[in-house]
Image (cartoon, rainbow, N blue to C red):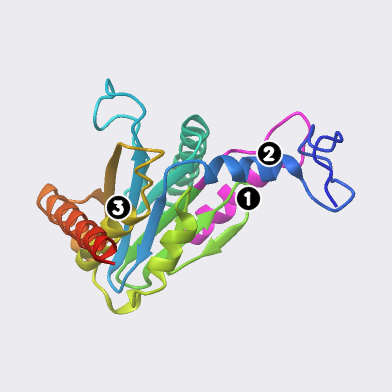
Amino acid sequence: MSSIGSGYDLSAGQFSPDGRVFQVEYAIKAVENSGSVIALRGKDGVVFGVEKIITSQLYEEGSNRRVHSIDEHIGAAVSGLLSDARAVVNKARDEAANYRDTYQVPIPLATLTERLGRYMHYFTVYGSLRPFGVSILLGTWDETNGPKLMEIDPSGTVRGYYGCAVGKGKQNAKTEIEKLNMTSMSCRDLVKEVAKTIYSVHDEVKDKHFELELSWIGKDTNGAHKLVPQELFDEAKKYAEEALNDSDDEDTDM
């Protein structure tokens, strides 16, 4: 049973007869049409990777980043509408700052995701608002609790993961991620695997150019979210390109 076009998709606060909220589904579709975003949780931290689609040759490299620092100890990567992503990231930063001001300690990731998920869900239950067309992946690491990785989707649902992928390459990326034994892998190893996965799921026919973004948080960064060092970035990019070329050669031989 489908209710598309019958008026049940005009408001986020209305269910269709078959129990669907079309505005939320449309927001999820906006995420699925965006570049792929991957996050992996290893034994000593979390690594984020982003396939940022380049739509113009006039684009300035490094602008409109999709990896962000929420607080010094929490990193994030976003997929979906960029303007919506900025609003969600700014809300997360406000929550982290308010918690630190009130309690004089950094906000736990579980508390942040609970508050941010509640905020995003608020936009799905009122007709005068629309859901955010963005999914956000958040990660942290500390000596006591180790690494944590969580996702919030446009409906405001919060999930914890060992490895997560969103965006247009989601299904293929999940297939690649499931082959990895992430709990025994270091962040340095995962950086290469994230880059390799991004390159493998990139659709060269529809999206010829893209910019790779890599960031991490873990033992190597003393619990601070940072961009991957240039030397390691270049090494991971080279590893990914070689793996992609090897895969193409195998397909050609067959």
Residue 134 visible, this angle: no
The one of 146 and 199 positioned closer to us in this rendering? 199
What residue span does the magenta drawing correspond to?
109-135
Question: Closer to the observer: label 3 or label 2?
Answer: 3
The stretch drawn in magenta includes residue 239? no
Badge nearest the viewer, 1 or 3: 3
**Mark on residue 123?**
2
Q: Position of residue 242 (x, y in %)?
A: 17, 58
Q: Secondary structure at mark 2?
A: loop
- Going from N to C along the chain, the mark reached first, 1 or 3, is 1
Local crowd at mark 3 within 10 Å, few (<14), some, or many (≥20)?
Answer: many
Say left or right for 129 vs 88: right
Residue occupied by mark 3: 199
Q: Position of residue 54 (x, y in %)?
A: 33, 32
Percent across and percent down for residue 30 are 57, 39
Asked whether disc 2 touches disc 1, contact meaning CB atoms under 8 Å apart, the reply is yes
Q: Farthest residue toward the front?
A: 254
